[in-house]
Amino acid sequence: MNVFTVNETKINSAPPGLSDTEAAQRLATEGFNELPSARRRSGAAIALSVLREPMFILLASAGTIYLLLGNMEEALMLLGFVFVIMAITFLQERRTEHALDALRGLSSPRALVMRNGARKRIAGREVVRDDILILTEGDRVPADAIVISCTTLTVDEALITGESAPVRKTASVSVLPARQRPGGEDTPFVYSGTMIVQGTAFARVYATGINTEIGKIGKTLRAFRHEKTALQQETGKTVRNLAAAGLVLCAAVIILYGITRNDWLSGFLAGIALAMAVLPEEFPVVLTIFLAVGAWRISRNHVLARRIGAVEALGSINVLCVDKTGTLTHNRMDVQALALDGEYRAVDPHMPVLLPERYHALAEYALLASRDNPFDPMESAIRNFAECALAGTEHIHGNWTLAHEYPLEHKLLAMSRAWQSPDGREFIVASKGAPEAIIELCHLPPCQAAAILETATSMASRGLRILGVARSWRKGALPGGQHAFPFLFVGLLGLADPLREGVADAIAECARASIRVMMLTGDYPVTATEVARKAGFKDFQQVITGENLDMMSDEELRARLPGITVVARAIPEQKLRIVTALQQSGRIVAMTGDGVNDAPALKTADIGIAMGTRGTDVARESAAIVALNDDFSSIVTALKMGRRIYDNIKKAMSYILAVHVPIAGISLLPVIFTLPMVLLPVHIVFLELIIDPACSIAFEAEEEEPDIMLRPPRPAGKPVFDARTLLLSILQGTSVLLVISAVYFIAIYTRRSEAEARTLTFTTLVFANLALILTNRSWTLTIPASARRKNKALWIILALAVSLLSAALCIPALRHLFGFSTLHTADLALTLTAATTTILWFEILKYNRGRP
């Protein structure tokens, strides 16, 4: 007979289970026990997306013309630039997919099943319908199943129901019991993704994969389509408009050039050069790289952006709805208080335990009443506390033998353990459980019982979970039940889930940044109140419960939302209702969650944040962001970095718009005035070799502004190019255009050669470009002030730009390729002076604004 023994308990003989052949057949017909994942983009698909970009088409066209003209050097230079962009895009796509693959593996369980009449450990994805699962403490249930035999089975179903307390399970009394929803006590169903907290069981699988409770929700969520973010839509619209304008100007230049100069091939090159100058292809590149690299930077703070577009929205969040357990707290229990003879003593879990002698018996018997290798978090806390407090004393009984364990009963919420002394003459019995159950076991008189319950209530008001401890002894055979022992009451223990380090500071930082934090928890009001007090929540007078919410209409809820900060005993459906009401009130909402039933709220929120350690696959698939360490401080850091990323995107795009004004202008003016062309495609590619890394690397690496978390969140839907930003960018670009145009026309009308005029104008444009980079690092700090801020990438790019320009001016072969002449020292000084004047007005404006 097969008997399954764990933790000194036995359950009925095991069914033989399926054979390997039957399991293989079901696996082939019904599929693996897993949720389908999103399809990957192939390398060919990534390359094709790059080939469709307008800039690629323009570069390919220009390169083809140069090939027809026999100019191989310029053709290769133009086409080589394409492969740089393609490589960056390809590598970033692969990096994101690898990160997500690693994340999916966090919750992949293994399963112990009966196969061919014997126990067998298999991958969770290989579990099939009608498999017999063997479940023990610490196991994650791999599929939905019916319990057919169990002993003291309790299951944590928080990932499905949001209920923080484990629930008891009973064996099925019928072959096919009526299906029930998750949650509630004494049901025979266990669900995929839930955790066995206590006891052992055999369970028959009835649903796997997408047919489980997790899978059903995941199936509905797969139909959800993500719209482009506001920034992506704005960028796309801007690029389309400028591309259309560029094509019109391109056609006009080709026609004008061809008619006035009777040189249509050169006209095509001039037209392509103008189109390349007008088309700000850096906009989508910057957006992609900033958000992708920003997501990587955020991941270094243990926050993974599953959808890169969510990084953009982080800066506009003004309400953050968070769970308590595991987010604000550690999701573990610590002993934090003791009560003995009406005397209360606080215990600091972060300090070494110095316990007076009179409390040693309380720690001793609490330890004896707990299992040796516990999975239950309260038993783990008791063991850690007692072993530390009693170290080196005679109260640690390593030579005693466990004789019997009396498990928790439905009618008596207490468990006892009987230990045999080394001489074998007597048994010492330790019991712990609910204070009411321990009082019942001790048969205390009403007055003493009332005093103990009053102390327990007082401790509970501090947000503690209370356990009573009792002791007894016996000589001779052990009885069948706990009531047969003459128990003596020892004392009370208070346990709580400790607040995470740094949470109070993070809450305060959110307040300074005008981000409102709401706690939505399934825990009790008293516990929620105590955690909110310790965490530094401000301006909340009372805790609203889920029952209170059910009594409010939608209109009343929206009216009362400004005064609601803490919601206790909230179920996932109520969290969804709160998120929806906040959004209807014009708020931009981020919400944390970990359970399957949290998935709709995570989808609905502007940013859903799933917990990476304890969250379900469905919660992670529903969320835009995953907090890998479940830490609230990491989430606040991500919000801060989101603001920085958006700031830097705005700086980069303002610079791009500004620098394209003079490039487009100096490409068009010679055509209008029938003068020699300054910029050909090769010159624009040279400029792009500076512009692209500057806007996508240097600005991305820029540190956040000092006041970034002292500003309110940016309004939802506020465009990057609002009126002020657009005006300043155009003014910057116009200033550069006026100066380089003056240099060009002076050179032409002082009878400088075409090569000399091009060299002076182009060099001035390059230096003015570098000046634009420096001045746009900050719109509040001047160049000398911002020079103190670290940005290694910026100085490398500036040095490379100067080196490339020097090479083009000094190396004869390159000088010929670019159509340059030799630049003398006086000419160089002229170009530097002219370039500096282009940004003086903006630096003076920043200086005056920053003065007290």
Image (cartoon, rainbow, N blue to C red):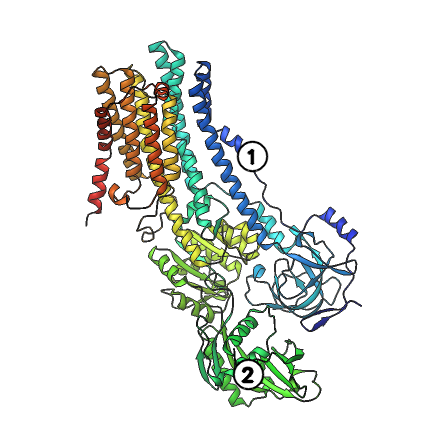
| Count of labels in the image | 2
The residue that appears at 46% across and 26% down in the rendered structure is 80
The residue that appears at 46% across and 14% down in the rendered structure is 68
Q: Amino acid at mark 1?
A: Gly
Q: Amino acid at mark 2?
A: Glu
- x%, y% of residue 485? 64, 87
Q: Is residue 749 above or below residue 765?
A: above
Mark pair 2, 1: CA separation: 68 Å
Which of the marked residues, 2 or 1, is nearer the chain's N terminus?
Answer: 1
Residue 558 in view here: yes
The furthest residue to the right: 1
Left or right placement of residue 64 versus residue 224 in this view: left
Q: Which structural element holds mark 1?
A: helix
Q: Which structural element holds mark 2?
A: loop
Q: Is residue 127 above or below residue 51?
A: below
Q: Quadrant of the N terminus?
A: bottom right
- x%, y% of residue 64? 47, 18
- x%, y% of residue 537? 38, 64
Residue 672 vs residue 788, the one in the foreground: 788
Residue 587 in view here: no
Residue 139 vs residue 216, the one in the foreground: 139
Q: Is residue 109 above or below residue 336?
A: above
Left or right placement of residue 231 versus residue 383 in this view: left
Q: Is residue 829 above or below residue 471?
A: above
Residue ID for mark 2: 394
The residue that appears at 67% across and 58% down in the rendered structure is 111
